Amino acid sequence: MSLPMVVAMLFQTGFSVIDMIFVGMSGAILTIAGQNYGADKLDRAQKTIRNSMLILGLFMLSVAGESLLFAEPIVSIFTQDAEVVALSIGSLYIRAPFWLSWG
């Protein structure tokens, strides 16, 4: 398989699941905080964001831990190509610790 194809598959495999989870949760948090802000309930908006950061941080900690523990089975769901699997696992080991900052 050519290098550009491997890189494209690696990028898609690594980002698809995590982005879906994180973007969905962030969108929900933003909606709730925005409604409170629009209703001029700033204390509730701050409380929503503070609590959401804690919950999302703990969630991303568990996602990062599970991704590190079960990297090969997770990646193998998306592709069976040995080169892409190996590179995706390496990519997960590098990126997973940074997911904690997303919370």
Image (cartoon, rainbow, N blue to C red):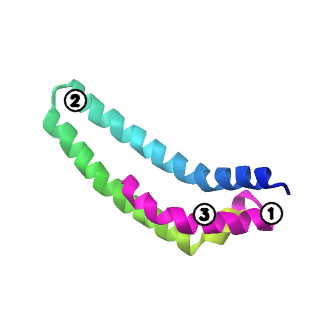
**Which quadrant does the N terminus fall into?**
bottom right
Q: Considering the whole magenta stretch, tell me its main secondary structure.
A: helix
Instruction: Between label 1 and label 3, give the one nearer the viewer.
Output: 3
The image quarter containing residue 58 is bottom left
Residue 71, picture quadrant: bottom right
- Of all residues, the one furthest to the bottom in this rendering is 69
At label 3, the amino acid type is Ser
Secondary structure of the residue carrying numbered label 2 = helix
To which residue does mark 2 refer?
37
Residue 81 has which mark?
A: 1
Q: Residue at x 71, y 57 (%)?
A: 78
Q: Amino acid at mark 2?
A: Tyr
Where residue 32 sits: x, y (%)? 31, 36
| Direction right: furthest residue | 1
Q: Which residues are magenta?
A: 77-103
On residue 91, the disc is 3
Q: How many tags in the picture?
A: 3
